[in-house]
Image (cartoon, helix red, strand yellow):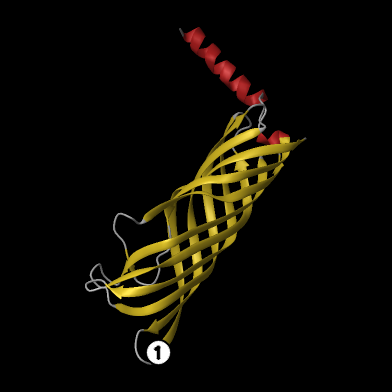
Amino acid sequence: MKKLLFLTLGIIIYGQAFSQSQNNYSYSFGIKAANFGDFPKLMNEVRGSESYRSSYLNGFVFKFNDNQISYRFVGSKYYDKNYTFKNVCHDCETVTGTFSDFTLKAGFERSLIYGVIQPYYGLDLGYRKIYFDGTANNANNNTLLYDVVVEKNGALIHPLLGVKVNLYKAMFTVSAEAGIDILYSNDRETKTLNDGNRTTSIANFRRWGFYNLPLSMLSLQYNFGRQ
């Protein structure tokens, strides 16, 4: 039994050491198939169990591979034409409108082993822009209170941990990773009241935010340019 166990472990280690991986190719291009995690609040948004959000097929990843290090660019765009949230308190305001979230990041990932299955860690730096255009109604009687535009522009740091699996002679790679978005943003809120004068007010804030992403990216990548 011990001999069989050692033989099995030897085969696995041998296969991991000499099998092909994504790093046998110079370039990789893939789609961001899914993500799931926390996201920035708008205004004085009140949340319950719905603080996490998922989205699908909303981005891309491009890599330059160099041995066990890959230099990467990741872009994504999320859009919701009917985004609704409670503001100030659950019985105060209901805000509804269109929401868009654009992120562009550049960074690196480093594989811990060289093989079919590769755990890795990395770090991205990037830019994030969130835009919301909607209306706020009284939560009790649905009376229009004001129109609102919210803009968030910020710089982010994204440390990450992940694992990738190389398929079919490492021409394809499936990867899943988790991370944290550390965002420093400039927020601009423009409100136009529903009064006779359409009074407009503008408020600016600078904020730090920390957002947990249990699945920051699930991607399918095609590898090319064999080294």
With respect to residue 173, does 40 lie above or below?
below
> What residue is disc 1 on?
199
* 177 relative position to 70: left or right: left
x, y percent for residue 31: 59, 45
Rendering quarter of residue 119: top right
Q: Which quadrant is the N terminus positioned in?
A: top left
Q: Residue at x 40, y 68 (%)?
A: 42
x, y percent for residue 150: 45, 73
Rendering quarter of residue 91: bottom left
x, y percent for residue 111: 61, 39
With respect to residue 17, does 156 lie above or below?
below
x, y percent for residue 25: 72, 36
In the foreground, 193 or 21: 193
With respect to residue 166, does 40 lie above or below?
below
Q: Residue at x 49, y 68 (%)?
A: 131
With respect to residue 49, does 218 lie above or below?
above
Please say whether residue 145 is visible from this viewpoint. Answer: yes
Type of amino acid at the residue the image marks with label 1: Thr
Please say whether residue 217 is visible from this viewpoint. Answer: no
